[in-house]
């Protein structure tokens, strides 16, 4: 394949501009807040963290963007403000920076009985998780943090202390409960309210003793330890998606139910006429759209929903999947209706077309243009993030976990042994265990670094081979493995379900009862509903408009017919595949497992994998491979969406720039944990729903009349069948 | 200009209004449709499009479809019988290579007159053709260009 030299030169120029931003080490230092409240008698410690790396700086730029978008997209309607305080009693020990002397207490009466801490004591405390996490200095995680005392460089450690009677831990959050006029502890798991209560006077006393975390930006001058948070309410984007889905279902008179059988017939090829305009058959269009949505949402999303919202969250996910079918139907019918068929028979369709052309026909040209542009820009960004970097990142982690499985197991055994030794007071034993743990951790970290670079390069190579090199067979082969993987995954789920079939009726009942009674995140039914709807939207992307791009490629002259096919998407994705995961998570009790969630800190895909391991010991390996293949096909499908969006704005010949950027994103996504970049792009997928659903609602009257006319012809037997 | 002798005139068309103009100008210059060599350049097929990943769309099929379309286009614009070639690749490259192959005396290209971002990203086919062509090139300004 030949590339115009000038385009390549321009792309290289853009890359050269971006790279120094990522790699340069200079830059303004971010001022950190002091976590330790300064005690009046001694000189205060000011944090002096190492300068942020290039990646951290990029991440912090995105962080502000994420916060800004979050306040809009996730603005909670009907939220309530709640006050809370955080118990943070600690003992600080310090020494001059760069020395090997023991750490000395900052104040004598610090509640921790040690006149000094030597290196091995510090290590043991760190192993027990009793130290506030240290700085990462020159790529190595330290036990201590850098600070300044009277302007002199020091190192210091902060020992976390438990509550006065040992009944709760450092970092516990207490939320104000007006019904009892006191602060009630918030449990880590699912943020449920707990039993421990403290009165406002006790809070004052604690504050005087320096037990409470101080708010750097206090809203109450006499209570500088109070923080504010919003609880409950529905994020605007979730309300938007849910309202859209309900509207389309009612407006199309429940077509997801009565059109279902016809949809299955179409996918089976009954109406496939090879002579009609388009690129692919109905089945191929559906497979293509599904390969973009099936993946992490089905494996990790369900688990996240249930750990946050309990089994009831799955009920709302399911409902959202069923209602989402009509959203998908409407948007994909429009995708077909307003697609443009190019002279060579290829098509360009999707929200960027129907928002612009469709609304223009309705006399709303300017609005249509604005919606189309907003959608297109968001789609490009989403294709780099949620459809690319996030996928690369998660599949990299899944594969890494598979390779490190035994070492990780050993590490957790060592941790247990250290705890046992600590309780028994065997200091020698503890030190030798600690040394072994340190070795193992170093090995793991070194391997992780190498592995991620190699994995990133390999993945970027395979993505590049297809989207830049035009090697058709790789994409075709990988994509065709997706349905197989889907079947393997479902089969494993079914095996587990059948083995425990006696428990299934009870568990299904739990899903339904918890949907209306469950307490998630302290937010009641609304909280459960929000979690479910949000995860379903991430999984099946109904309302985001992305699938309309794939479905508009189908060979048909009946837009409604392709819409019918599209409604099967959320059904397969959410109602079938997600249910499988949900039942496995319920059967294994993974959603409520203290050891896995609280102690081992497992979540999402890792928790799902752990749950499978309980039933089929070797399955996590298959799951890691499946996650990687799903991720690969999602990257390919989303790159297509992104490229089509790019083409709409910048023209077909410049897509080479898009492709280069996409390949670079795959690599960056794998090697660095850009939390905020991922959040940002994830939000873009949901953000696409704003312009899309608004436009689709405005255009829905024509879809409805098309549907009713189509159905009349169908019932009159007007359609020729081919199979 | 008509005193110059143009036996082979290459006219790239992308079916836009500008390329209709190019076609008509070349017809007027040549005076005879048989002197025209019309070329249309298709972008290479995307390996990530559903049609390639899941279906079996081929360049041959696209060429077949676009030929039918182009023949109709020529007919509508009074150039029935002009020789037509379809190539796959980068437009500027394919146009100049084609002109060399057929020993063209002149290439008549239309300029889309893009500005700003679009121009930066797309570049100008006309510009590139002028730079690489081995024969004379006539560039037609877009009629509504500033």
Image (cartoon, coloured by chain):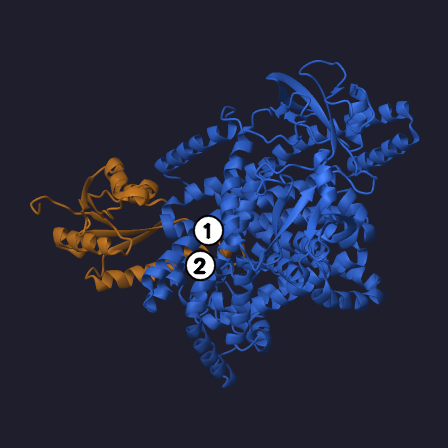
Chain colours: A blue, B orange
Task: Tell me the SS state at disc 2.
Answer: helix
Give percent across and percent down for residue B42: 36, 51
The answer to whether residue A18 is left or right of residue B114 is right
Chain assignment, label 2: A
Name the chain letter of the residue that bears numbered label 1.
Answer: A
Label 1 element class: helix
In front: A324, or A430?
A: A430
Q: As displayed, is residue A697 above or below residue A417? A: below
Whether the residues at callouts 1 and 2 have beta carbons within 8 Å, the answer is yes
Residue at 80% across / 59% down in the picture? A587
Q: Residue at x 77, y 27 (%)?
A: A110
Q: How many residues crowd around disc 2 within 10 Å: few (fewer than 14), some, or many (20 or more)?
A: many
- Give coordinates of residue A674: x percent, y percent: 57, 38
Q: Locate residue A159 relative to residue B120 in the image: left or right.
A: right
Label whose residue precedes the other's in the sequence (1 or 2)? 1
Q: Quadrant of residue A583?
A: bottom right
Q: Position of residue A244 (x, y in %)?
A: 52, 66
Residue A722 in sight from this viewpoint: no
Q: To which residue does mark 1 refer?
A: A378
The residue at which mark 2 appears reads as A691
Is A178 above or below relative to A333? above
Q: Is residue A119 left or right of residue A477?
A: right
- Viewer-proximal residue among A67 and B57: A67
Image quadrant occupied by the N terminus of chain B: top left
């Amino acid at each position: 394949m030949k590339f115009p030299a000038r385009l390549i030169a321009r792309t290289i120029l853009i890359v050269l501009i971006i790279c120094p931003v990522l790699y340069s080490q200079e830059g303004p230092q971010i001022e950190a807040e002091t976590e330790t409240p300064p005690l009046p008698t001694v000189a205060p410690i000011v944090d002096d963290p190492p300068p942020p790396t290039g990646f951290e700086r990029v991440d912090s730029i995105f962080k502000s963007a994420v916060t800004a978008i979050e306040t809009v997209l996730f603005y909670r309607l009907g939220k309530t403000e709640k006050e809370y305080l955080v118990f943070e009693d600690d003992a600080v020990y310090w020494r001059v920076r760069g020395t090997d002397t023991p750490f000395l207490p900052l104040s004598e009466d610090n509640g921790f009985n040690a006149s000094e801490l030597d290196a091995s004591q510090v290590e043991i405390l760190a192993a027990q998780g009793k130290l506030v996490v240290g700085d990462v200095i020159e790529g190595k995680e330290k036990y201590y943090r850098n600070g300044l005392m009277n302007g002199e460089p020091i190192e210091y450690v902060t020992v976390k202390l438990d509550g006065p009677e040992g009944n709760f831990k450092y970092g516990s959050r207490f939320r104000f409960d007006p019904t009892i006029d006191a602060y009630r502890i918030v449990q880590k798991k699912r943020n449920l309210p707990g039993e421990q209560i403290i009165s406002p006077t006790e809070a004052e006393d604690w504050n005087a003793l320096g037990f409470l975390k101080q708010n750097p930006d206090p809203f109450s001058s006499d209570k500088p330890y109070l923080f504010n948070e919003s609880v409950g309410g529905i994020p605007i984007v979730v309300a938007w998606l849910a309202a859209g889905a309900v509207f389309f279902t009612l407006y199309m008179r429940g077509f997801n139910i009565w059109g279902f059988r016809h949809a299955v017939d179409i996918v089976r090829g009954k109406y496939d006429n090879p002579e009609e305009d388009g690129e692919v058959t109905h089945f191929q269009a559906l497979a293509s759209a599904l390969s973009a949505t099936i993946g992490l949402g089905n494996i990790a999303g369900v688990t996240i929903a249930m750990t946050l919202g309990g089994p009831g969250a799955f009920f709302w996910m399911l409902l959202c999947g069923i209602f989402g079918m009509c959203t998908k139907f409407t948007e994909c019918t429009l995708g077909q209706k307003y697609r443009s068929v190019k002279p060579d028979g290829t098509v360009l369709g999707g929200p960027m077309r129907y928002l612009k052309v469709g609304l223009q026909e309705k006399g709303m040209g300017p609005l249509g243009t604005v919606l189309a542009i907003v959608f297109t820009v968001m789609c490009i960004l989403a294709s780099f993030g949620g459809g690319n970097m996030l996928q690369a990142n998660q599949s990299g982690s899944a594969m890494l976990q598979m390779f490190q499985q035994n070492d990780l197991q050993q590490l957790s055994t060592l941790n247990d042994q250290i705890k046992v030794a600590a309780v028994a007071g065997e200091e020698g034993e503890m030190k030798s265990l600690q040394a072994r743990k340190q070795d193992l951790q170093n090995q793991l970290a070194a391997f992780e670094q190498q592995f991620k670079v190699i994995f990133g390069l390999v993945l970027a190579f395979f993505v590049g081979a297809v989207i830049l090199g035009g090697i058709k067979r790789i994409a075709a082969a990988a994509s065709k493995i997706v349905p197989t993987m889907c079947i393997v995954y479902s089969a494993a789920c079914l095996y587990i379900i059948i083995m425990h079939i006696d428990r299934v009726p009870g568990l299904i009942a739990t899903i339904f009862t918890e949907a209306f009674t469950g307490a998630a995140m302290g937010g009641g039914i609304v909280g459960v509903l929000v979690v479910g709807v949000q995860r379903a939207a991430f999984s099946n992307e109904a309302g985001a408009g992305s699938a309309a791009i794939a479905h508009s490629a189908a060979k048909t002259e009946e837009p409604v017919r392709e819409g019918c096919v599209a409604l099967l998407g959320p059904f397969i994705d959410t109602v079938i595949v997600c249910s499988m995961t949900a039942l496995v998570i319920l059967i294994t009790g993974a959603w409520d497992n203290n050891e896995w969630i609280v102690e081992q800190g497992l979540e999402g895909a890792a928790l799902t994998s752990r749950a499978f391991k309980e039933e089929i010991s070797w399955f996590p390996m298959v799951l890691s491979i499946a996650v990687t293949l799903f991720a690969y096909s999602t990257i390919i499908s989303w790159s297509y969406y992104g490229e089509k969006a790019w083409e709409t704005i910048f023209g077909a010949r410049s897509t080479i720039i898009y492709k280069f950027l996409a390949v670079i994103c795959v690599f960056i996504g794998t090697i660095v944990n850009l939390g905020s970049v991922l959040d940002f792009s994830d939000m873009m997928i949901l953000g696409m729903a704003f312009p899309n659903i608004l436009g689709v609602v405005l255009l829905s009257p024509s879809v409805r009349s098309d549907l009713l006319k189509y159905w009349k012809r169908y019932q009159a037997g007007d359609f020729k069948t081919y199979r | 200009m008509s005193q110059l002798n143009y036996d082979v005139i290459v006219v790239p068309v992308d079916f836009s209004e500008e390329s209709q103009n190019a076609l008509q100008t070349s017809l007027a210059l040549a005076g005879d449709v048989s002197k025209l060599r019309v070329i249309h350049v298709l972008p290479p097929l995307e390996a990530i499009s559903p049609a390639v990943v899941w279906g079996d769309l081929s360049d041959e099929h696209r060429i077949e479809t676009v030929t039918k379309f182009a023949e109709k286009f020529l007919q509508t614009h009074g150039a029935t019988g002009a020789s037509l070639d379809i190539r796959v690749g980068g437009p500027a490259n394919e146009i100049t290579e084609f002109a060399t192959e057929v020993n063209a005396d002149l290439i008549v290209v239309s300029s889309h007159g893009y500005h700003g971002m679009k121009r930066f990203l797309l570049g100008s086919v006309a510009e590139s053709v002028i730079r690489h062509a081995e024969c004379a090139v006539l560039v037609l300004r877009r009629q509504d260009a500033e």
